[in-house]
């Protein structure tokens, strides 16, 4: 399988993942808060498992991207500041500062 590899600025990557994934499944590779690396297949806009209420903070101000982890079937947040790469629709993006 031949994928295209592109570089993208961190600010543009955050905007892209927030607005242009359009409910599509994508994967992200990032460094977790404890320093370990994580690869996650996720999707934005999943509402099926919500139990009501809202986040007590603004994820955008903390550079977090709320997603639904498809393998664990739970909601997670991806730290945009530690994002290394992501893949959407066969396109792989390497995130740079």
Image (cartoon, helix red, strand yellow):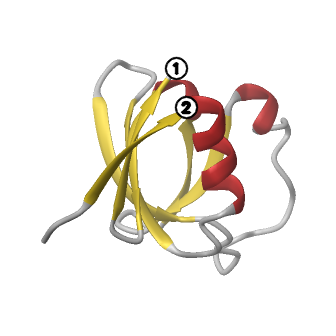
Name the spot of residue 69 as percent of width and height, x first.
46, 61
- Quadrant containing the N terminus in the rendered view: bottom left
> Is 23 situated above or below 44?
below
In this rendering, position of residue 8 left or right of residue 64: left
User: Going 41% across and 28% down the picture, which residue do you hit?
Assistant: 32
Q: Which residue lies under the disc numbered 2? A: 9
Pick whichever, 80 or 71, lies toward us. 80
Task: Report helix, strand or loop for mark 1.
Answer: loop
Name the spot of residue 53 as percent of width and height, x first.
87, 59
Q: Which residue lies under the disc numbered 1? A: 97
What separation in Å lies between label 1 and label 2 (alpha carbons)? 6 Å
Q: Are marks 1 and 2 in contact (CB under 8 Å)?
A: yes
Local packing at callout 2 (Cα closer than 10 Å; few below 14, some 14-19, many 20+) is few
Count of labels in the image: 2
Is residue 28 visible from the viewing direction of this image?
no
Task: Report helix, strand or loop for mark 2.
Answer: strand
């Amino acid at each position: 399988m031949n994928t295209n590899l592109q570089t993208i600025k961190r600010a543009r990557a955050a905007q892209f993942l927030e607005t242009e994934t359009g409910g599509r499944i994508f994967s992200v590779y990032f460094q977790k808060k404890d320093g370990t690396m994580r690869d996650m297949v996720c999707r934005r806009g999943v509402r099926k498992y919500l139990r009501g209420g809202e986040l007590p903070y603004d994820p955008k101000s903390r550079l977090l991207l709320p997603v639904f982890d498809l393998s664990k079937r739970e909601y997670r947040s991806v730290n945009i500041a530690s994002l290394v790469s992501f893949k959407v629709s066969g396109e792989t993006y390497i995130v740079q500062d």
